[in-house]
């Protein structure tokens, strides 16, 4: 079962349970899938593959994380709570992200393989690592690990 099908099933069961927050979150996610298809000039009723689904869900989760931080900074814990609940629903469909230690092992090996030592190449190196770990690691963690390698 694809991620898109899993989300449709989760939405149906949320409707039966009358969990409107979950229904709204899943509907928004389905809408984001449609928007992604339309942006790619693909028919909106085309089923999406898991790679595209993960990319969209990751983007939506990042929006929730940003909102949580902003609402927390503004003292709006009630709104932050709602965003956290939505984030939890989204994270169910994302793969487990790598830890910083796992990223460090890969980054060290890649740095030696490519013989990169010049700190001016750090941005390019982050891009290389991100493309290799696409969907498996958080970008902020990758940046933090790469920064530690060049310090």
Image (cartoon, grey):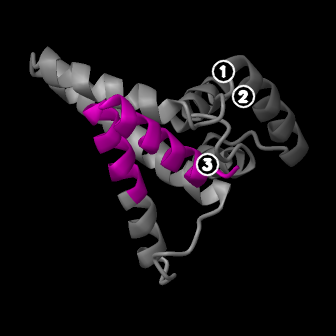
- Reply yes or no: does residue 16 show up in magenta: yes
| 81 over 127 or under it: above or below | above
Question: Alpha carbon of mark 2 to alpha carbon of mark 3: how far?
Answer: 25 Å
Residue beneath label 1, please?
100
Q: Nearer the viewer, mark 2 or mark 3?
A: 3
| Local crowd size for mark 2, using a 10 Å CA cut-off: few (<14), some (14–19), many (≥20) | many
Residue drawn at (63%, 51%), measured in percent from left and top?
127
Residue 75, given in percent of the width and then of the height, sits at 9, 16
Depth order, front residue of 128/50: 50
Residue 99: quarter of image: top right
Q: Is residue 130 visible?
A: yes
Q: Residue at x 57, y 37 (%)?
A: 93
Q: Circle 3 is placed at which residue position? A: 3
Toward the viewer: 90 or 64?
Answer: 90
Nearest the viewer among 31 and 138 is 31
Q: Pointer 2: what residue?
A: 103
For this view, does 26 lie left or right of residue 151?
A: left
């Amino acid at each position: 079962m694809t991620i898109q099908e899993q989300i449709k099933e989760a939405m149906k069961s949320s409707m039966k349970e009358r969990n409107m927050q979950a229904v709204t979150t899943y509907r928004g996610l389905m809408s984001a899938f449609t928007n992604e298809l339309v942006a790619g000039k693909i028919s909106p009723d085309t089923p999406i593959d898991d790679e595209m689904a993960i990319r969209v869900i990751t983007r939506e989760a990042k929006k929730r994380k940003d909102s949580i931080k902003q609402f927390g900074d503004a003292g709006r814990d009630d709104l932050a709570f709602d965003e956290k609940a939505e984030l939890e629903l989204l994270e169910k469909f994302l793969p487990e992200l790598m830890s910083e230690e796992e990223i460090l092992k890969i980054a060290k090996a890649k740095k030696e393989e490519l013989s990169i030592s010049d700190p001016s190449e750090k941005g390019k190196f982050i891009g290389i690592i991100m493309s290799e770990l696409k969907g498996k690691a958080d970008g902020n963690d990758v940046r933090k690990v790469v920064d530690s390698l060049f310090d």
